[in-house]
Amino acid sequence: MQYLAARDEGDVLEALSDGETSVLAGGQSLIIDVRRREHCPPRIVDINRVTAFDTLIENGGFLRIGPLVRHRTFESEKVAGPLGELMRVVVQHIGHPPIRARGTMLGSLAYAHPAAEWPVVAVTLGAQLVLAGLRGRRTVAAGEFFTGPYGTVRRPDELLVEVRLPLLPGGTGTGYAEDRRTTIYPQAAAMAAITVTDGLITAAAIGLVNAGPCPVRARAAENVLLGGPCSDAAITAAAEAAAEVDVTTGDRRAIRRQARRALSQARERV
Ligand SMILES: Cc1cc2nc3c(=O)[nH]c(=O)nc-3n(C[C@H](O)[C@H](O)[C@H](O)COP(=O)(O)OP(=O)(O)OC[C@H]3O[C@@H](n4cnc5c(N)ncnc54)[C@H](O)[C@@H]3O)c2cc1C
């Protein structure tokens, strides 16, 4: 296996243009897969020296995150407001401190483990993902990026250069809950964001893990909440509706329970 150390984005895109080279970001999934011989690319391009990739900025209503921003960054107060609050909760569920110190958010999105935390956050919030190749850049909605377990629309010659998470307005409360026993990844998980104006829910987003081959929005559950107060009855009805999604890989009861927990947390944080 050949090792290439990139100095800038051009080096990375040049290396990827053969369609067979893998990006090395935090290495917290790639190196394990290589060691287990589950994935043996002929070449690896290491992006860790591309300092321009370590970018985290708020701009145009989005938090824009580059390929070298580590999970650990989101443990700090760097991101303000309801989005920062959500990320500080979610990141605590990812592995353990050494994994969070090396692993990157964009690596997690590119890897697309079906039960990973960042993909469901991206899908639920309606994030945009920016892909770059030698032929140019394109932007894909998170809801269209994931195609199944470990599957995305990223072409082999493309680098995921940025994810844009919409900043959440004041009056938004968020929650994230997962059911994890002895495995690395959760069996079921849910993320919720609700915005309350004058006592009524004006925006709702609920995302589920293991309710399908990749993270999904529970639109029916969101519709149950819209326009009404965030009462116990509304949360129960929405959690019930969340469990009615096409559950192909998961457990309806576990999904209902996590949806209810995430919504209850969101209500407390509004
Ligand atoms: C013990 C352990 C526990 C873990 N627990 C969790 C957990 O609870 N939740 C969780 O979500 N994750 C968990 N992980 C995985 C961890 O979050 C990884 O950091 C993440 O999956 C991949 O990020 P990375 O930066 O390490 O990517 P790498 O391992 O470097 O790369 C992973 C894959 O993505 C590709 N890639 C990376 N960056 C890009 C990019 N910018 N553009 C295109 N392709 C790219 C690589 O080529 C490779 O195919 C765990 C890992 C370990 C070892």
Image (cartoon, rainbow, N blue to C red):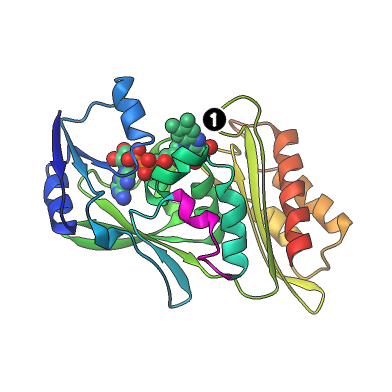
Q: Is residue 228 left or right of residue 103?
A: right
Residue at 24 percent of width and 62 percent of height: 137
Image coordinates for residue 241, horizontal then vertical, percent: 74, 48
Residue at 58 percent of width and 46 percent of height: 92
Q: Is residue 229 left or right of residue 186?
A: right
Image coordinates for residue 96, horizontal then vertical, percent: 52, 37
Q: Which residue is mark 1?
A: 184
In the image, is residue 225 above or below residue 91?
below
Name the quadrant of the N terminus: top left
Location of residue 67 by image quarter: bottom left
Name the quadrant of the C terminus: bottom right
Residue toward you, 244 or 19: 19
Image coordinates for residue 188, horizontal then vertical, percent: 64, 36
Answer few, some or many: residues within 10 Å of disc 1's Cα (few below 14, many 20 plus, some between 14 and 19): few
Please state the extent of the stretch shown in magenta in the rendering.
71-80
Location of residue 53 by image quarter: bottom left
Name the residue type under label 1: Ile
Residue at 64 percent of width and 41 percent of height: 189
Location of residue 60 by image quarter: bottom left
Residue at 50 percent of width and 41 percent of height: 97
Magenta stretch containing residue 74, yes or no? Answer: yes
The residue lying furthest to the top in this view is: 36
Asked if disc 1 is less than 8 Å from ligand 1, the answer is yes
Secondary structure at badge 1 equals loop
